[in-house]
Image (cartoon, rainbow, N blue to C red):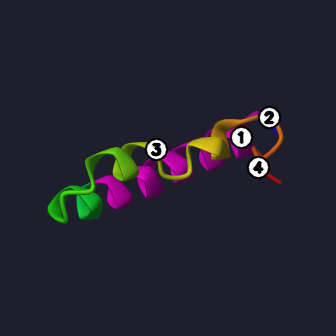
Amino acid sequence: MIKAYWKYFLYILNHKLNVLIESWKEGLYIQGIIHDWSKFSPAEYNAT
């Protein structure tokens, strides 16, 4: 169970990093940082 949460956490971080890189290229700095931030909230964090 913990492994699934860890794997999902790493997936979200990887996604956020990719979005940040592409957003940065376009000058969308704030959007790149806050994109999908809600994915870390208990309501949306679903590793199953």
The residue stretch that appears in magenta: 2-20
Task: Specify which label sits upstream in the sequence, 3 or 4.
Answer: 3
Report the amino acid beneath label 2.
Pro
Q: Quadrant of the image for the N terminus? A: top right
Report the amino acid beneath label 4.
Ala
| Alpha carbons under labels 2 and 4: distance apart | 11 Å
Q: Splitting the image into 4 quarters, where does residue 30 fall?
A: top left
| Alpha carbons under labels 3 and 4: distance apart | 20 Å
Q: Which residue is mark 3?
A: 34
Task: Specify which label sits upstream in the sequence, 3 or 1.
Answer: 1
Q: Which numbered circle lies on residue 42?
A: 2
Residue occupying the point 16% across, 62% down: 25
Q: Which residue is mark 1?
A: 5
Q: Quadrant of the image for the C terminus? A: bottom right
Q: Main SS of the magenta segment?
A: helix
Report the amino acid beneath label 1.
Tyr
